[in-house]
Amino acid sequence: MPSTEGRRPPRGRAVAAAALAAALLTGGLTAAAHAQDDSALPDRDAALAEAATLRQLADERGLRMGAAVGARHLDQPDYARTAAEEFTSVTHENSLKWQTVQARPGQFDWSGADRIVEFARSNDQTIHGHTLLWHSQLPSWVADGGFTEDELLEVMDTHITAVVGRYRDDIDTWDVVNEPIGDDARFRDSVFHRTLGEDYIAEAFRMADRADPDARLFINDYNIDGINAKSDAYYALVRDLLARGVPIDGIGFQGHLVSGQVPADIQQNIQRFVDLGLEVMITELDIRVQLPATEQKLEQQADDYTRVAEACYAVEGCSGVTVWGVTDAHSWVPGVFEGQGAALPIDGGYRPKPAYWSLHEALGGDPGPAPTDPPPPGECEAAYTVTNQWQGGFQAQVTVTAGTDLTGWTVGWTFGSGESVAHAWNASVTGGGADVTATNAAYNGTLSAGQSTSFGFVGSTGGGVSSPEPACGAL
Ligand code: XIL
C-alpha cells in the first residue's frame, strides 16, 4: 500500500480510528465519519487508515489472531471496534469461568458469556472456550465441597455438559483443563486432584468430548513456552493421554512472559508437541515490561513479540496466537504484577505499539514505523477508558501521551448528564457540572515526547456512563 516518504503507515485501520478521530476532531469531523469514509480524510491519513488489520492478515494465512475480551468493556465503542476489527477470534477473559457461570450449584448465569458469544457471532469471529476445569476462580461450593469421588465426577460432568453443550454451535475449541501442573512440575493440588487423582484430567476430556464430539480439546498452562521441567511434565502427560486414547487435541501455551526473557527454544518446544500429533496455540500472550515503559523497552518488547509469533507461524500445527486483552488499559498485568504492565501490542489509547507492528510483519504485513519516527504531533493526546462500572458508579482511566517534551499537562472533557468525579488519583481534578479539568500531579507532569502517564478516578452517575473525548494541552 502507499506509504509516506518510504515509511510504513504508523497505524492499522481499527487502532487508527481513535487516534485519527482525536487528531481530526479539531476539524469538526467525527470518529464515525473517519472510520467509514476515507474520502473525507486528507491523503496521508487516508493512506494510514488503509493499512491491513491483524485480522485481515491472519485470515489470509488461515491463522488465529485472537484476543481475550471482557464482557463489561463491550459497551465502549473503541474497545468493541478494535476487538472486532483486529482479531479473528475471541476468548472470554472471565465470563466462562466456573465462578462466573455456576457460582451456586445448579444456578447458571450465562449473561456475560452469552454477551461475548453474541459479539463474536455478529462479527463473524471464532471463539476459544476458556475454561472448564481450573483450581482458580472456582466457587467454594466446589473447592470446599467435601465430595466423594462419584459426587465430584457428577459435579464436573454437570458443569462441563452444561457449558460445552450450550455453546456447541459457537465454540469449537476449549481449554478443558487449565493449569493442572505446578511450577514444581508435579500435579497441582486442587479439589479435583485431591479427590480423584490425576485421572480427573482424562475424565474431564471425556466429558467435554461427550458434550461436543466435534470440539477440539486443549490443556493449557503458563511457563511451558520453553523446554523446562514443567513443559517436560506436560510432554509426558499428554503423550500418556494420547496413548490411552483420551480425546485431547491440543495444548495451549499461555505465554504470560517477561520482556527480554522469551525462551530461546520456544519453536523447538512447539515442534515437539506438534510431533506428538497435537495442535499448539499461544493462548494468552502478553509480554510485560517494568513501568514506566520507555521507547527502548517497547522496542525490546517488539522483538519479543516477533520471536513468539514467528516461532508459532514457523511450525505447521501451531494455529496462532491470542493476546490476553485488547489494550494495555484492559490488561490484567498491572493489577497482578506490581510495577509491571504495558504488556500488549495496543496501548491504552488504542494506538499500535511497536509490538503491534511485530505481529503485523510476522503475519506478512508491512512492518511498522522505524523506532526513530517522530512522536505524534501536538502537545499531547489523552485517551479516556471506562475500566469498570456498576450501579451508580464507574471507574475510568485517562492516559496522557506527550507529543513534545512537557513539564505539565491538563486534560479537559465534558461528562454526560449526572456524571461526576468522586475520587481521583495521579492528577488533580476540578470542575463542577459537566466540564471537568484534570492537571498533572507533582510527580507526573514531566514527560518526554512519546512518553505516557495515566490517571484514574471513581465517578458517580445518575444514569449511563459516557465515553467522553478528552482534549489535552501543555501547561
Ligand atoms: C485472569 C484474568 O485476566 C483476570 O481478569 C482475572 O482476575 C484472573 O484471571 N491464566 C489464565 C487466565 O488462564 O484465566 C487468567 O486470567 C490469567 C492467567
Image: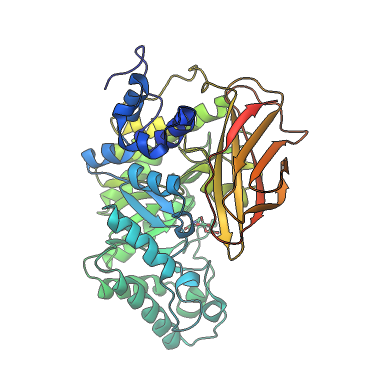
The residue closer to the viewer here, 371 or 3, is 3
Residue 422 seen in the figure? yes
Position of 63 with respect to 22 (left or right) is left
Whether residue 25 is situated above or below residue 251 in the rendered picture = above
Label count reads 0
Front one among 225 and 63: 63
* Residue that protrudes farthest toward the right in the picture: 442
Q: Quadrant of the C terminus?
A: top right
Can you give x and y, in whole percent of width and height, for residue 101 in the image?
45, 72
**Residue 249 drawn above or below residue 133:** above
Q: Position of residue 259 (x, y in %)?
A: 53, 36
Q: Residue at x 52, y 21 (%)?
A: 377
Residue at position x 55%, y 85% in the image: 146
**Quadrant of the snapshot with the N terminus:** top left
Residue 371 position in % (x across, y down): 48, 20
- Closest to the observer: 365 or 472? 472
Where is residue 120? Give x, y as percent.
32, 56
